[in-house]
Image (tube, rainbow, N blue to C red):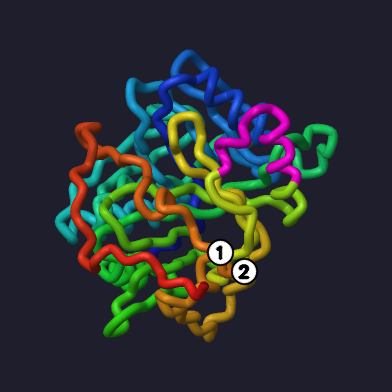
Amino acid sequence: MSFDIIRAARAILHVTDLNQSRDFYVNALGFIETEADDAHIYLRGLEEHTHHSLVLKKADEAAVEAISYKVRNEEDLEELAALFTRDGSKVKWLEAGSQTAVGRAFRVQDVSGMPVEFFVKMDGAERFLQRYDMYRGARVQRIDHFNCMVSDVEKAYEFYTKKLGFACSEYTAGAEEKIWAAWLHRKPTVHDVAFMNGKGPRLHHIGFWLSDCMSIIHTCDVLASIGYGAHIERGPGRHGLSNAFFLYLRDPDGHRIELYTGDYLTSDPDFKPIRWDINDSRRQTFWGHAAPDCWFEEASTVLDVHDGQKQELKEAVLAQQKPTFIT
């Protein structure tokens, strides 16, 4: 393939109350607010040199407008759009200037129905990596990945690996070696996107990278001290898959955010994907603790890129199954 998708780059979330969202993301988690107006807040992590990696957009209902990937150049953008068109998908172009800080882009519903965006250019912003005086809350450094709940994981896996050039780092398989979940990457870490089995398409979570495990522990203390303890859904803990230390939070509208650190390098071309059995109690939490039911059942609604309507949900191809844990 002749195009180069670089990494997961930004997400656009619809939220119902910008002030509540600002308090959670800026005051509690420590995101940097780059810009805001009556309908939007643009946020970035301390390490990021681009205008934003998260857009909070005022709306009547919470939803996901798009998840977005950065590509290398305009030629790559054209090649990607042509690929989706050949596959029968309708592409929506967004010309430069039509979005704050982002150049020419296009959006499309991917093979699973997720609203996906690709762009090349974004305005720059001051990088605050060494502005330690500005570190607060979770000390969020950068966006890391998306996790999508889809009805057919194998279909998504095939499309992203064979047509978009993603590589697989780890996967979960069950009976007859059917893929239950897959972790796929473009940047040389464990994933830019993961697909998990369930009623979809829905966005399960957005992962943001922290610099160390103690930042996650510190986040728990901060959230509890300012009244956000109930927003901690799962963790802190360590994943078996990815080896990463994690904490899952729900924002004021129910969108799930993962704070994430400690995964590993995947840049070698001969790296072999790691298989996990669906019933291995260590795969989701290396220490063996089960995730709550809401973690399997709840996720954010996604919108159609053309008409803005909610995407119709499809039942999972594989029967819903929670892992069996040894007690």
Residue shown at 37%/46% (left/top)?
Answer: 298
Q: CA distance from mark 2 to mark 1?
A: 6 Å
Q: Position of residue 321 (x, y in %)?
A: 32, 66
Residue shown at 57%/71% (left/top)?
Answer: 240
Majority secondary structure of the magenta segment?
Answer: helix
- The dot on residue 287 is 2
Q: Residues within 10 Å of mark 2 (few under 14, many from 20)?
A: few
Looking at the picture, which amino acid does disc 2 mark?
Answer: Trp
Q: Position of residue 150 (x, y in %)?
A: 29, 57
Looking at the picture, which amino acid does disc 1 mark?
Answer: His
Q: Which residue has dot 1 on it?
A: 289
Q: Are marks 2 and 1 in contact (CB under 8 Å)?
A: yes
Judged left or right of residue 287, residue 127 is right
Q: Position of residue 191 (x, y in %)?
A: 51, 63
Q: Nearer the viewer, residue 198 or 32?
A: 198
Magenta region, residue range: 218-232
